[in-house]
Image (cartoon, rainbow, N blue to C red):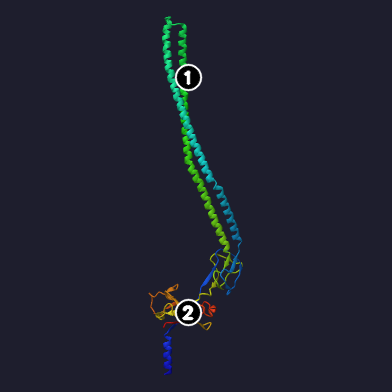
Amino acid sequence: MVLSTAALIYWLYARQFESTDDAQVDGHLNPVTARVDGTIVRVYVEDNQTVSTGEPLVDLDTRDFQVALDQARAQLAQARTQVSAQQPNVPITQAENVTNLSSGEAQVASSRAALETAERDRDTARARLAESEALNTRAQADFERYKLLIAKDEVSQQEYDQIVATAKSQAATVAANQAALSAAEHTVDQRRAQVAESQARLAQYQKTASQMLAIRRATVQSQRAAADTAEAELEQAQLKLSYTKIVAPVDGIVLRRSAEVGAHISAGQQLMQIAQMKGLWVTANFKETQLRAIKHGQSARIHVDALEEDFEGVIENIGAATGAVASVLPPENATGNFVKVVQRIPVRIRFNPNQDGLARLRPGMSVEPKVRIQ
């Protein structure tokens, strides 16, 4: 009767919990990797050594990276010098364009004014020729008439001589005016050619002015882009130099240190790991039949075998898949004979904070959690 009562009490007590011995302490293992190729010249830590965030772990040889940094600085200085040399060309070209356009417009205006003057001179010469031709026509007519009169002795020799002189003078005036008109017309043709030439020159100035300015601006932009590229390369060189100082990314304890002085390493190569001692949790693999009553937020008592101590925790989440499904090579149940096997699903249990002894926990320790389900 006593045994039956005790068994009943134990059964009633056990119904309040779900437990498993397939559980262990887990934590974050942060890899420490190289970000550049290089040769190790110093290692500051050993396995199982406690480190803090930012604490130096490994130094790489900096000489090659320092040379690259110096070259990048020189290239940036050269690129900036070229930008400084090209920048004044833009306003200079703008000023030259304004000067050339103003000069071209002035030449066009001057040649047009000269053409107008030449055309007026030509019109004046044409009027003088017309006037002298009219006078010459009358003088020649008087000459012919006086030739008849002198033959009849109806006019004196003196009068006749005067008429002859007048006719010759008027004929000479006509010839002179014809020559003057021809010269004036030639001058007009020259002035028109000068107008056309100055207009063509102005049009060429107008056409090339924008092109030259665009070329100057494009050159400056190209030099600025080269300077930006050089600046980016300088920043990259500075970063690579800084990567030769490898520091701890987190607080924790060093594990699996493989870095040795003199070793040549490649970018991405793992040098050690750092196990975080804060924020540890338990991964408990419960049978799927046990999950009927296990829910998020339930409390759990965690017994740590190595410490022979119990800790309090809370269910943080339940795995999205069984361990078999999440494995690299999941089982293929569609082939062969099927044997039903109870699956296990990982459940994460977070330790409650501010408990004595948490600092003694280590990832990988075996534990036995009991989850209160009632």
In the rendered image, which residue does mark 1 sit on? 176
Camera sees residue 12: yes
Residue at image location 56% in from the left, 59% down from the top: 237
The quarter of the image holding the C terminus is bottom left
Question: Height in image: 227 above or below 259?
Answer: above
Residue 283 x %, y %: 47, 77
Residue type highlighted by circle 1 = Ala
Q: Amino acid at mark 2?
A: Gly
Q: Where 246 sits versus 173, above or below? A: below
Please name the residue shown 55% across and 56% down the image: 231
Camera-nearest residue between 325 and 192: 192
Task: Identify the element where label 2 is drawn.
Answer: strand
On the image, the x and y values in percent for residue 313 come to 47, 79
Q: Where does residue 281 sit, x and y in percent of width and height?
A: 49, 76
Query: Would you say residue 185 is visible in this rendering?
Result: no
Separation (CA) of disc 2 from disc 1: 129 Å
Residue 160, by quadrant, is top left
Residue sitting at x 53%, y 52%: 226
In the rendered view, tell whether residue 117 sits above or below residue 58. Answer: above
Query: Horizontally, is 263 left or right of 335 in the view?
Result: right
Write down the residue under mark 2: 313
User: Residue lying farthest top?
Assistant: 153
Q: Residue at x 53, y 50 (%)?
A: 223
Q: Element under label 1? A: helix
